[in-house]
Amino acid sequence: MAEIKLFGYTNKLSVKPGENIDFHVSADGTNSADAQLVRIIHGDEHPNGPGYMDEEIESDLNGKWDVKKQFTQLGSFLRVNDPNNLLAIDGDFTIFGYINPSTPHTGAHQWLFCRWDNKTNKGYGIGINKDGYLELVVGDGKEVDYLVSELPLVKKVWYFVGATFNYKTGEATLYQEGVVNRYNSLLGKVVPYDYRSHTKTTFRFKQVNDSQTPFIIAGAIDDHELRGKFVSGTYAGKIDRHGVCNKVLSKEELDKICSGEFPDKNSLVAYWDTTEGHTENGIGNDVIDVGPNKLNSTGFNHPVRCMTGWNWSGKNDCFRLSPKEYGGIDFHPDAITDAGWDVAKTFTLPEDLKSGVDNAKRESTYFWIWYPSIRNELNKHLVFNDRNNNNRISFDALLINRRFSSYIYKYDNIYGDRTIRDYIRQRQGEDKFQYQLRLIMESERIKKEILDFEVDMWGY
Amino acid sequence: MSDIKQKKNKTWKNPLAVWGSKGGNHEVPTPEYKNPHQIWKDTKAFKVPTNKIGRFHYEYKSTNHGEKIWNRLRWWPTRRTILWTQGVYNRKSLKPEKIRKDKRPIFWFLSLLFLAIVPFILPDGYKNSLLTAGGIFGIYASINLCWTLVIGTAGIFSLATYAIVGLSAFLTTWLSINLGLPWWMLPMIGMIVGLAFGIIIALPALRLDGFYYGLLTLGLNELCRVFITTSHAFGAASGGLYGADTFINENWAPMTQTLVQYYSGFALLIAALFLFRFVDAKRLGRILKLAPEKKEAFAEASGVDYKRARVTVFLISSIALGFIGGFYAAYYRGSAFDIFSFHTVIMGLAMITIGGIGRADGAVAGTLIIVIIDRVLVELGPYRYIIIGLLMMFIILFLKNGLFGIRKQFRDWRDKKKGEARSTRLERGGEMLPEQATETDNKDEIYRKRYDKMQREFLKTLICDEIIEEHKSKPLGQHSEALERVLYYFRRGAMNDKYVVKCEEPFKKYKIMALSGVRGRSPRLVEDKIYNTVNEAYHGLFLRRVQDLMEA
């Protein structure tokens, strides 16, 4: 019997009555779970307090839920929207792009540009092998053929990498050149690394393309019995402009692209210009294909855009000043924006459901304490601050400095002890939010009055 | 400043004395000259004794191709490159260089090339005897390679190898004499004989293990010997059965005959090496490497059908041994009873143990050594066997896996010694040793450790009863300077083995655990003691950290 584990999250942190909230639950070792909605009255279990208190609330959320094991896609990558499978190239191809790997020696394979399925071993692509060398891979579903570069990739250095494959003769080449200038990489030109590596061989096998596999940048399709298709082999580092051609480019042609020229348009299948689409406020998740087929790619798990690119000169410190130098996209193998689990239950909050805090009926005072009398006690106890463990202050200092947020709902004046709600009433036809805003404004007015009074006292 | 020469005399002469030394000294005794730069030199000097550390700086490494394209040639029907070569950056000079990850193919190629051309470089006087021995070496090495497949790869301790060869040789000779079969049929028929005999002796291997199976096969060997030597059909009277057809024509010049013998033995060796390579390093061999001795049950539970693989390897090598038997008959025109004798089995065993069981290079080199002692150094007489015995004795006593295991054994020994030597000098939380410094890529770590050590030394001086008492009375909050320094150091520590408080029941039960430092790996409990309040737990944890600091 496996250990039962339940994890879950909701799509919102806070909800108002009448709104929907989705619960996403993943379960290990079980496929059903009991749920009960409670209102927490007191959550602190300190023995000096009243202890943990809650009350159960009738709702249609309660009861047995069907739950299942859910998986989270980690790592950022780009998926190319290619409905006509133009990238399923059953012939000569050239893949090229600028890369800046941050951890090439992870001991795991990282994919750069590929149309590859790890389960069926079909497709083609280039990646970084587990020893940190650039690798071209083609597979026909049974056999995989590969070519490895001569020298390992140095971390955090801009490279131009490319691979060509001649479908007829099986000749494959790998192209790897460093495009280091004084500023763009971790190492400058003074470090005497020779980044160049050009290898070639004759493959025994040719690629066979699946129709379902998408072209992915910084990852490859994988399959799991329970999970289904997902992306694995995600890459850590930056990628700048990249593209695919349907012919074998010569070394001279690749040299030209490496130096920053636009590739030959006739053979181009896709060329993703990562600097295209810059606005004043940044850039979205879509990477624009400026080639003939407009095969834009979409980022998942938020690949970070507007990073310094391979041609960053070190002069312009913002993507607004020189968008063409900010083509870098940063990928992280552990990035996540949304776990994307299936919804286990959706709950619509009834209009009359009161929350724990804003419950009018519970606005009862426990006790009153005269502040000066407990200052000695307050001064002894430190405030727990999870943001800063070192600069500790006492509760007294916290209150004196007004380092808390508060909400005034009662005001002691000639009318006696009355709440704001008692004298500011909801007007006929007034919106609920409008009314609450007036309550808060009244509260702020009182706060300002107190502050003015305090300040005036010192104005001698 | 070595140009300043030290003065020998210990007298100071006034340089102005030529103008008169009124009121001054003309000459005074003085202490020996001391170089004023010496103190500067001493202060700057690197005092640690510097030994040559690092590895293999004398090994030749080729450089990279740079701009040129490196054509990675492959062995024709495979995806393997000619040599397993990898380009790396030299960690010190950052120069690109190529390392050969596996140098064995080079040694094999050179050795086999030497064997191929050796007939042309041998001195005439020894040529005949050496080449005859070379032919014998080829056949024995092939037999031993097949035997290595059985003992090493399949892990079946069979001693019936020579029985299969002998039986096949005798049967094919008999068939050749009586039916007039041509020489090229003999190895083919030998294969059938080998398969049949292999099946018979493979069956008990499924039920018997190790020593008992060895005894059984030795018994079979003896049975064959007794049967053949007493049987009239196999020439009980003449000490062997001869007269089979052969590929060596008697009308050729004697040297041509010897050369044909030598090269046919050599060809047989190459064929056996290919067989070994394709059985041991391919699917069958890999299956069997998953099921090493004494771990068969585990392998079986994991779905490895090792029994089938073992029997398959055994049958394949039996067929190969049968082939060699037929070849043997065609080579010598027959066979002597000698092949079944206990002496032959022991010699064969010596050959494979000397080189190292389970390795092709071990089997071939061991055969070479024994054949040289046994067949070339004939004039030593019976002392040869004493030499072989001593050699075996030495190898069994001092080496773990024969001559070719020396490399690994030496490395293990060296690493053990290195570890021992380091552990005597290393201290917990201490500085990095000079030789360790070359092994880390992050050189900041060297200084961090030095800094850490200095800080620990200082903090040790702060630990006293007062601060422990202070911490006990109030684990959190503002502390005295000394305690705060100690606590800062503790809190900043690395995540692996860092102590943490575990709340078993809020405000009632607390325990102390240590973090693993690896994401996803749970912390471990360090003690069973239960603290009733969180402050007690804080203090218990503090005391543990203090103890660790003081012990280091």
Image: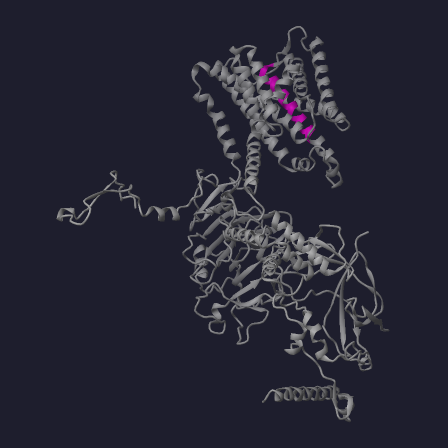
Q: How is the image coloured?
A: one colour
Quadrant housing residue B464: bottom right
Give the percent coordinates (x, y) of residue B211.
72, 23
Specify start and end residues of the magenta stretch as a single range. B313-333
Res B341 seen here: yes
Q: Is residue B504 left or right of residue B259?
A: right
In the displayed structure image, the side of residue B308 where residue B135 appears, left or right: left
The residue located at (43%, 50%) in the rendering is B66
User: Does the magenta run of residues contain B78?
Assistant: no
Residue farthest front in this picture: B23
Task: State the image coordinates of residue B544 (x, y, percent, origin top left).
Answer: 67, 52
Instruction: Give A394 or A447, whichever is nearer the viewer.
Output: A394
Residue at the top extreme of this rendering? B237
Residue drawn 55% across the image and 65% down it? A329
On screen, B245 above or below A398? above
Q: Can I make out residue B183 in this image?
A: no
Of helix, strand and loop, which mostly describes the magenta segment? helix
Residue B319 on the magenta span: yes
Q: Which percent across, then down, holds residue A88? A: 60, 59
Residue B183 occupies quadrant = top right
Residue B35 versus residue B512: which sits nearer the camera? B35
Looking at the rendered structure, the number of numbered marks drawn on it comes to 0
Does B255 appear above or below A278?
above
Residue drawn at x 67%, y 28% as measured from the top left: B150
The percent position of residue B28, horizontal first and vertical second, equals 23, 43
Between B392 and B543, the one nearer to me in the picture: B543
Quarter in which the C terminus of chain A is drawn:
bottom right
